[in-house]
Image (cartoon, grey):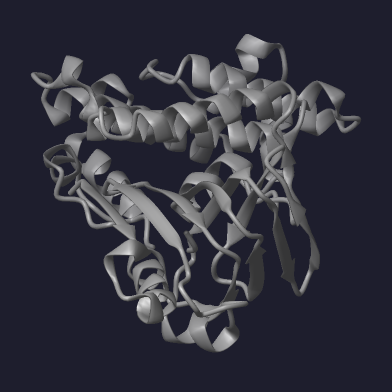
Amino acid sequence: MAIADSATTDAVDPRERADYWAHVIDMYQCRLGYRFPSRTDFQGSSQLRRTDSYQLIGWESDAVTYLRTRKLIRADPDDNYRLIIPFTGQLAFGSDDGHGILTPSAMLLVAIDQPFALSMSEATRGVIINIPREQVRHRLNRVAPPLGPLDLTTGLGRVSAGIVGGLYTERATLTDREFDSVSERLVDLLCMQILGDPAASTTPLADVAAAARRYIRAHVGDPDLTGACVAAALGWSLRQIQLAFNAIGTTPSEIIREERLHVACERLRSPAYRRCGIADIASDLGFGSASSFNKAFRRRFDTTPSQFRGGVVGDTGPRLLA
């Protein structure tokens, strides 16, 4: 179910605004600790757009530090990511693995199930996007996300910045399907930027895996697609393909299934496929039966294809900071 909301500390008494802000952020995100340099007349406002899969919060506030401690993690578990993009001001972040400064020229992917502190300067404004962990995990193939900021000034980062700005500006006009589709494209670019240019790799197996994955994405609609087909098309042996994917902790069949499920989600959301039965979508994407498709879909997304199409999916993008 889609949710749109907004909040401002102007709605409450100046003496209660810090507590009100903490309540709003806990409600939108997860349980956090707060340090306010001044609790007198704290100023903050937020705009929320949430679908069953993604959540975007635009915020503007006075200086505040958000804390995610081990005690809070145990009390309110949340293993999804938050992508933080400041538009103005700067953010100081720190965790057990290091610390740094986040400025409007960069974005930061935060794992909310690990302790951290995030301090926002006065008059900071920006966007935070909740991303389901699985959407990052399957694209990175177990490659660990970076601990520091990602550049937004050139290349894929600059393209991502444009998408973030457009998603925030048009949040009220996009349908749920459109909002999710744009969010998924952003995650694609984010993970591509994290992985870097496969052509620059000095590891031959990494080159093989990157080329094989590109081929799979381009031919995922082929119901006869197999690891052997990919190997033959690219001029390698099946063993080379298997070794390349094994080096990153997966297999050709897992990648093919993951890409097919990704396309299945797009088709279940798309008005162009509204008249297409779920069994037909499954067959077109190479699943042996509707039953095997339903089983794979439920295992991957914790819901059935029919529930997903009907919008009865649980909120897979829990609630960080604003």
Q: Nearer the viewer, residue 41 or 236?
A: 41
Q: Nearer the viewer, residue 60 or 244?
A: 60
Asked whether, in this view, residue 39 is left or right of residue 178, the answer is right
Q: Residue at x 16, y 37 (%)?
A: 309
Residue 24 to residue 40: above or below: above
Q: Is residue 99 left or right of residue 183?
A: right
Can you see residue 196? yes
User: Which residue is rendered at x = 34% and y = 59% of the image?
Assistant: 8
* Residue at the limit of the structure toward the bottom, as seen here: 71
Q: Could you say where residue 282 lies in the image, as x and y percent from the top left?
A: 24, 29
Front residue of 124 and 264: 124
> Residue 193, position in %: x, y?
69, 33
Q: Looking at the image, which residue is at 30% across and 48% down?
A: 50
View extreme (left): residue:
275
**Residue 162 in which image quadrant:** top right
Residue 288, visible in the rendered structure: no
- Name above or below for residue 17 compared with residue 213: below
Pinpoint residue 159: horizontal percent, then vertical percent. 61, 23
Left or right of residue 156: residue 133: left
